[in-house]
Each structure stands twice: as structure tokens, then as C-alpha cells.
Image: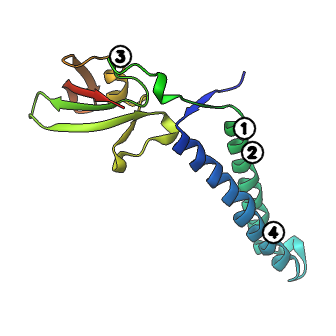
Amino acid sequence: MANISYFTEEGLQKLKDQLDHLRNVERPHISRQIAEARDKGDLSENAEYDAAKDAQGMLELKISKMEEMLSNARLVDESKLDNSKALVLSTVKIKNIGNGQTMTYKLVTESEADLKSGKISVSSPIGKGLLGKSVGDVAEVQVPSGTLKLEVIEISR
């Protein structure tokens, strides 16, 4: 059974760029390392050769996984999403009832999550708590430090 992953246009392009980098930059680099190590003589006692071959195996595994993810990728059409509820690709402004602090997050798929740019995964505790909520709803989110009460102030795309 294929694991379907949903992406924004930006996230899908980022995945394609990473795969392209692995294929066209990293793969030739490791091939050169293997060739250089092979030129040093006896392969049975060549730690550089063994390390380069291990790195090649790891790289090929990573490329294979990314190719599989790309083959099962689906692009999300943001224009067809409902703005009345917090869904994947919603930008949600929330207020922490406990301390009065407001925050704005974009709910994204796990593969696109990046807290520094305000993108949280829908599979994270806060993301799960916000999914399906409307403006004015209060989400009670279990976090390691206890329960957060977050009020949804605004939902946009």
C-alpha cells in the first residue's frame, strides 16, 4: 500500500530540488571518493573505500525513499479548501488563554513543517488540536508541560 503524501506547490518543488541535488551533486561526489580510494591499492584493508561504499549505500537508500515519496505525492489545491475551519494549509492565529500570547501558524504536512518559518505539522499536538476548529473555538492541547488552551482568533489561507 502506497503512502500518499500531500504537498503544497512550494513543498513539492523543494522535494524535487533535494532529489535533484542528491542525484546530480552528491552521487557523483561519492563516486569520485570511491574511485580515489580504489586507486590507493588493496581494497581488503582500505578503510576509505569501505567508508565511501557505506556512504554510497546510504545515499542510494535516501534517493530511493525520496523517489518513492515523489511518486506518491499529491498536490493540494488551496483554492478548494474551506476557510471556516482549520485544515491543512490554513493559517491560524491563536491566543494562548493561559498567558494571553498570540501566535500565527500555518498548518502543513509533516514533510513541510518548519517551526522557524511558522509552519507546524498537522500531526503535532498543536496541529492535531487545531484541526477542524472554527474561529472562536478553544482547543485543549496536551503538551509535555500540561494542557494548553488555545483560542482560534482567525483562519485564512
Q: State yes or no: discs 1 and 2 in contact (Cβ < 8 Å).
A: yes
Q: The residue tagged with tag 3: helix, strand or loop?
A: loop
Q: Residue at x 26, y 38 (%)?
A: 104
> What label sits on residue 68 in the rendered view?
1
Q: Residue at x 55, y 40 (%)?
A: 9
* Label located before the other in sequence (3 or 4): 4
User: Where is mark 2, residue-wise?
Assistant: 64
* Label located before the other in sequence (3 or 2): 2
Q: CA distance from mark 3 to mark 2?
A: 35 Å
What amino acid type is highlighted by mark number 1?
Glu
Looking at the picture, tell me which residue is in the foreground, 91 or 96: 91
Say left or right for 61 vs 4: right
Give the mark toward the camera: 1 or 3.
3
Q: The residue tagged with tag 1: helix, strand or loop?
A: helix
Q: CA distance from mark 1 to mark 3?
A: 30 Å
Q: The residue tagged with tag 4: helix, strand or loop?
A: helix
Q: Residue at x 87, y 76 (%)?
A: 38
> What label sits on residue 31 in the rendered view?
4
User: Where is mark 3, residue-wise?
Assistant: 132
